[in-house]
């Protein structure tokens, strides 16, 4: 069964450093998403991406965040200058262009900001 | 604004007991409702959607628009049902954001 792949599985970084989280969505999926989950809290929407542009973003997704699809397979989330409160599990998801709003999630990347 | 409320953080039952995980929602239009599940050390995955009206692993959920609820039910819980369960909502548009509740941890004891 096809999977959404995320790397790294865990990253530890110093406050103020830039972080790039990578995702390989399912090959025939055209909608891509990033969600995050701070420990003990709910899964929160960050951004959706379609046709090489952001289609929707939440208020969490401020100027410190950016997304990119640099080639035909990767979908990245960049945090320009990490803060302590960025520590969370970041989930990438993708879905087909047609059909219901059913997302397939990756296993997540745990980001720890010290 | 769309909102999903799961009032219970933890639900603990014995094997064979009935289970009901509560979910209430707030949405101005006609929503799509989902239940996602996350087993220990596994990724978040779709359990069922209200449109399908199907039973998955013995679980069912009925959309009650009058009570704005989408409770997840199973008549006889199994130990392997122990997991984190998330209720989620989106609009019908293909661009609609999927919004999650806070999740309920289900623990099924032998």
Image (cartoon, rainbow, N blue to C red):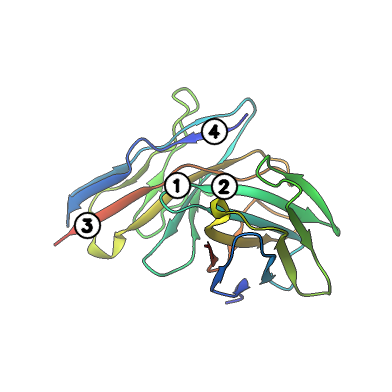
How far across and how far down the image is residue A109, in percent?
56, 67
- Left or right: A16 in relation to A50: left
What residue is pinned by disc 4? Answer: B3
What residue is pinned by disc 1? Answer: A41
Mark 3 or mark 4, earlier in chain: 4
- Tag 1: Cα neighbours inside 10 Å, few (<14), some, or many (≥20)? few
What residue is pinned by disc 3? Answer: B108
Mark 3 against mark 2, which lies toward the viewer? Answer: 2
Q: CA distance from mark 1 to mark 4?
A: 15 Å
What residue is pinned by disc 2? Answer: A44
B34 or B63: nearer the viewer:
B34
Same chain, labels 3 and 2: no
Circles 2 and 1: CB distance less than 8 Å? yes
Q: Helix, strand or loop at disc 4?
A: strand
Circles 1 and 4: CB distance less than 8 Å? no
How far across and how far down the image is residue A3, in percent?
60, 74
């Amino acid at each position: 069964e096809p999977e959404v792949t995320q790397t790294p599985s865990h990253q530890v970084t110093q406050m103020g450093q830039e972080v790039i989280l990578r995702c390989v969505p399912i090959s025939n999926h055209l909608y891509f998403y990033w969600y995050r989950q701070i420990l003990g809290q709910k899964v929160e929407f960050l951004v959706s991406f379609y046709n090489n542009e952001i289609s929707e973003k939440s208020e969490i997704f401020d100027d410190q965040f950016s997304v990119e699809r640099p080639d035909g397979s990767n979908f990245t989330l960049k945090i320009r200058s990490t803060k302590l409160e960025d520590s969370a599990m970041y989930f990438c998801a993708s879905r087909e262009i047609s059909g219901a709003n059913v997302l397939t999630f990756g296993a997540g990347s745990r980001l720890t900001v010290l | 604004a769309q909102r999903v409320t799961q009032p219970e953080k933890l639900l603990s039952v014995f094997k064979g007991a009935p289970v009901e995980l509560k979910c209430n929602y707030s949405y101005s239009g006609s929503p799509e409702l989902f239940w996602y599940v996350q087993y220990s050390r596994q990724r978040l995955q779709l359990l069922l959607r209200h449109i399908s009206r199907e039973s998955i692993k013995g679980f069912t959920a009925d959309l009650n628009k009058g009570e704005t609820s989408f409770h997840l039910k199973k008549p006889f819980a199994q130990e392997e049902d122990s997991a984190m369960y998330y209720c989620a909502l989106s609009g019908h548009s293909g661009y609609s954001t999927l919004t999650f509740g806070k999740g309920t941890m289900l623990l099924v004891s032998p």
